[in-house]
Image (cartoon, rainbow, N blue to C red):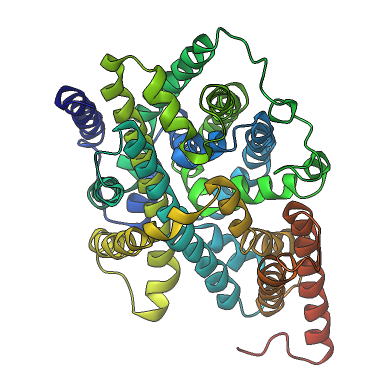
Amino acid sequence: MNGIQIAVALGLLALIALATWVKVRGSRHDGSERDVYLAGGGLSWLYVAGAITLTNLSTDQLVGMNGNQMLLLAWWEISGFVGLLILAFVFVPIYYRHGCTTVTELLERRYAGETASVRLLISALFLFGNVLIYLPAGLYSGALFLNALFGGGVPLIALAAFLAVVSAAYTMLGGLRAVAVMDTYSGFGVLGVALLIVLLALSAIGWDLSGIPPERLTLIGDANSPIPFHTLFTGMIFIQIYYWSTNQNITQKAMIAPNVREARRGVLAAAVVRILVIPVIVTLPGVVAYKLLGPVGDKAYGLLVARILPPWLAGAFAATIAAAVIAHCAAVLNATVALYAVDFHPRLVGAVRDQWRLSGVATLVVTAIALALVPVYAGATSIINLLQQLNGLSSMPILSAFVVGLLFKGVSGRAATIGVLWGVALYALFQFLLAPRGLVTLHYIDFMVIVLASSVAVALLANRLSKARGWADRPA
């Protein structure tokens, strides 16, 4: 990529920043939690849809899913449509009715007796996942793609640092309002160029997929595939409910609207994009790359784009990809800081006098940690599969706390905490000991159902025992 193309990329990023500033500069700020972390509840359905879409769609998906070089990975996005419908019609009304800033606030309101423990534990699991998994993986995959697009001329860690600094700047200077607006403006470019890549890729092979192995074209996965077909009816739906309905990174974006009706419209708009556009752009380029380049793994998308994209578009495409990574990381950063500021800081340090200042300091700390972890992901065989497997450490245990709290009455926060800890320990045992040694051969998506069901059962059993022994209402 020459100097002119780099200038085009930086110019477009600056244009997005300018458009974002113009949109948010007249907004009134009171420095409250709702102002900093929920955009003051003043954004329309369009920004809800844009924020949700770009929080999810980054190089984790474009690079990671295309890196599998098979159509089968489309099921993650197709099933996500169902998850968004559940968010729109079940969870959005609940969050708005309870006036939540974080999803963990809902848990505190639903449980009986001592509740701080379950709220802090769930918040800690979210923080663990964001800081140690999602942020560094997002920065790494974005830097990996741009490195391939630039022909390897720019060090990967330098690209990751650039993406991290700009993401942190959005979060520190504009809060979720700026992040959501930037997500939306970037989204139009990302989706448009990603669809163009699909068309150019198919044109490069004459719209002929012959010669590609059948297992890379099928949507019916066998037992050894990343998504065996039966798992769509076991753990997949619960993964989607967790991700779209109880995950702070996503649900926070559904709470930036003034009311339930506007929020629901935004979520449904995101669902339409999810089912019509996303499955195509995260799978077909990887399959075409297999025909043109062979099994190149996570480098597939970057190498394909470098090969098929006209030189005059390279700078624009680099800008859209960088914008997608920045939008994703800024959204996760804001969610992470919100969890700390609302759930931890008041309990561990004291009342927050200046949410903007706290947000700035916490953002710098989290960004530095995530950037330091970027090299850890360089050895991953598949980014997206690694993320999904690591996600199981927290996803089903967290979902169990919501299941117990929303479906059962009179359960103590202490009992829910025991259920969550059981789930984390059980999945860790499976992922790091039993599965690697062949002692349990279940697919990890199947095992997630066992983790969820047993976590719920353990919580209910702990609650029954605590009541029988008079422990339920004692302080921790």
Quadrant of the image containing the C terminus = bottom right
Quadrant of the image containing the N terminus = top left
- Residue 233 falls left or right of residue 272: right
Q: Which residue is drawn at 81% across and 92% down?
A: 469
Q: In front: 214, or 164? A: 214
Residue 371 in which image quadrant: bottom left
- Residue 472 falls left or right of residue 162: right
Q: In front: 208, or 118? A: 208
Q: Where is residue 195 in the image (x, y as percent from the top left)?
A: 48, 18
Q: Which residue is drawn at 61% across and 44% down?
A: 93
Q: In front: 387, or 253? A: 387
Residue 309 lies, with reference to residue 48, above or below; the image says above
- Residue at the farthest bottom position: 469
Regarding residue 154, the answer to whether it shows in the image is yes
Q: Where is residue 237 in the image (x, y as percent from the top left)?
A: 74, 44
Residue 72 in which image quadrant: top right
- Number of numbered discs: 0
Residue 34 lies, with reference to residue 18, above or below; the image says below
Q: Residue at x 78, y 79 (%)?
A: 463
Residue 19 in which image quadrant: top left
Q: Position of residue 54 (x, y in %)?
A: 44, 36
Q: Position of residue 404 (x, y in %)?
A: 74, 64
Q: Which residue is drawn at 41% across and 24% down?
A: 305
Regarding residue 40, the answer to whether it shows in the image is no
